Image (spheres, rainbow, N blue to C red):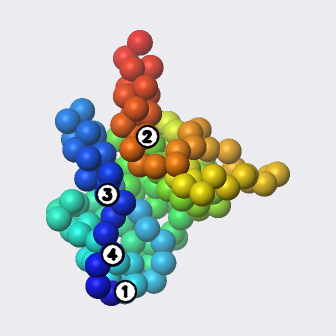
Amino acid sequence: MGDFPFMPEVAGMLTHLAARGLAAVIITNGHHTVQRDKLEACGAASLFPEPELIIVGGEEVMAGRAEKPAVSIFAKACAAAGCAPGEAIHVGDSLATDVQGGINSELRATVWVNPAGKVRKAGDPEPTYVVRTMEELPGIVDQLMAADAA
C-alpha cells in the first residue's frame, strides 16, 4: 500500500483536541483487512495508540454489529471517548454515512469535510458544519466549547 498519509493537518488537530482535554476516535467503514492496511499505512496507530480508539466497520459487521450510519457504532465511539453522544462531534466526508449517522445518533454536531465544494442534493442530510480542510476544525471545536461554557 506504500505511503498513505493522513491529511497533513490531522496531527495538529489531534494536538488541539488533546490540549483541551478532548478525545478522538476513528470510525471507518469497509472491509477490515483493507481498512486496517490503510490505517497502518497512514500512521494511525501512532496517533491513536489505544486499540479501542480505532473502530473498523468491517470488524463490527463480522462481530454481528453494524457499521456507519448505525447508531451502535457511534455509541461505541462515544463510550471509547468517554463522552455522551450529545457531547460528541463527528467529522467525515460522507453525507450518507458520516453526517446521517451523527444525526441518527443525536451527536452535538456533524462536520462534513467537503474539499471539492460539492453541492448537497435535495434530501441529503444536513451537516451542522461544512469545511473544506481539516484546518477549520479547531475553530469549530473552540466555538462549540465556548457555547457549552456560556
Q: Residue 64: horizontal and vertical position, in percent? A: 47, 78
The answer for how far apart the CA atoms under marks 3 and 1 are is: 24 Å
Q: Which residue is mark 2?
A: 136
- Residue 140 position, x and y percent, is 44, 33
Q: Amino acid at mark 3?
A: Pro
- In the image, 122 versus 118, the foreground residue is 118
Q: Secondary structure at mark 2?
A: helix
Residue tagged 4: 4
Q: CA distance from mark 4 to mark 1?
A: 15 Å
Q: Earlier in the sequence, mark 1 or mark 2?
A: 1
Compared with 40, 69 (above or below) is: above
Which class describes the residues within 10 Å of circle 2: few (<14), some (14-19), or many (20+)? some
Q: Is residue 47 visible?
A: yes
Q: Residues within 10 Å of mark 3 (few under 14, many from 20)?
A: few
Please, what is the three-letter code of the amino acid marked with disc 4?
Phe
Query: CB of mark 4 within 8 Å of CB of mark 1?
Result: no
Work out whether mark 2 precedes mark 3 in sequence or the reverse, and give the earlier one: 3
For label 1, the SS is helix
Real-space Cα distance between discs 2 and 3? 13 Å
Q: Which mark is residue 33?
A: 1
